[in-house]
Image: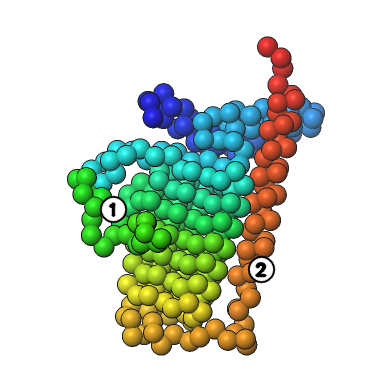
Amino acid sequence: MNRVALVLAGVGGFLAAALVGLVAVLTGEAHRSGMELDSLRSQVVLLQTAVTAAPGHDGRGHGRPNVLTSFNPDINLPRLEESAFVDPMASVIGDVQLGREVYVAPFASIRGDEGQPISVGDETNIQDGVVIHALETVQGGVAVPNRTVEVDGKPYAVFIGRRVSLAHQSQVHGPARVDDGVFIGMQALVFKASVGPGSVLEPGAKVVGVNVAGGRYVPAGMVVTDQATADRLPVITADYPFRTLNDAVVHVNTSFARGYAGAAESAKAAAVALTPPR
């Protein structure tokens, strides 16, 4: 990627971050001067056009490249499926892949600029304040041992499967693997660990250096740091109160992905219609 493209991508990120502040200023100005509401709306739409016109901005999300370091020898831009949506106040950096109908909420951070790559599967939601990051996987051009997880023969710093919910302020720090249908509760942590399909980490739970089998749950606030304890975790049964929680959360957040993406498309179309001919 050439320097101009990188600079433009950075400009796009700045514009997205500045949009909220500019709208607030315009709103205040409208109140003071009696500016017509329709005029205010037109200016907001034109600002949205500036954001969506920048590289990496298509109205559905954004990302920016990482920088070259001794532990990251390549410059990468995040790769988003068309139906994924990243809120303009979220941050997605570097070697990150987001699947279909992934929703990334405000103030979430997915950083593929140290450990890489990071993969997030279809219909997964990354809620407000979530952090996904990883320890460096390469140093001096050589792979660092035990810093990746293998899925279908490919190494990942962080691999998150399909229909996973990462609730507010939770963290997944690589090397880590989270399989399909997992619910990770508010302020929970996964670090140097794997979590099997259909499992639940209740709020505040922490799993470090262990493998959690599928269909288990980690009670709220519990810290699991040895495999023997992980092997004794309770099995999810029909009377477990959070057994179907993840299905409901996925439904809500895939609806957000579709709805916000649709709204962005509508705003983009309106901006084009309002742009004066040259």
From the viewer's perspective, is residue 161 above or below residue 14?
A: below
Is disc 2 surrounded by few (<14), some (14 to 19) or many (20+) residues within 10 Å?
few
> Circle 1 is placed at which residue position?
136
From the viewer's perspective, is residue 59 above or below residue 153?
A: above
Tell me where residue 29 appears, x and y as whole percent: 69, 30
For the residue marked with disc 1, what is the amino acid? Glu
Residue beneath the point at 68% across and 33% down:
268
Local secondary structure at mark 2? helix
Residue beneath the point at 24% across and 52% down:
143
Which quadrant holds the N terminus? Answer: top left
Q: Nearer the viewer, residue 71 or 162?
A: 162
Left or right relative to 268: residue 141: left
Tell me where residue 248 appears, x and y as whole percent: 66, 68
Q: Is residue 19 visible?
A: no
Residue beneath the point at 49% across and 55% down:
120
Is disc 1 surrounded by few (<14), some (14 to 19) or many (20+) residues within 10 Å?
many
Local secondary structure at mark 1? loop
Q: Nearer the viewer, residue 208 or 258?
A: 258
Say which label, 1 or 2, has the lower sequence index.
1
Tell me where residue 178 appears, x and y as whole percent: 45, 66
> Circle 2 is placed at which residue position?
248
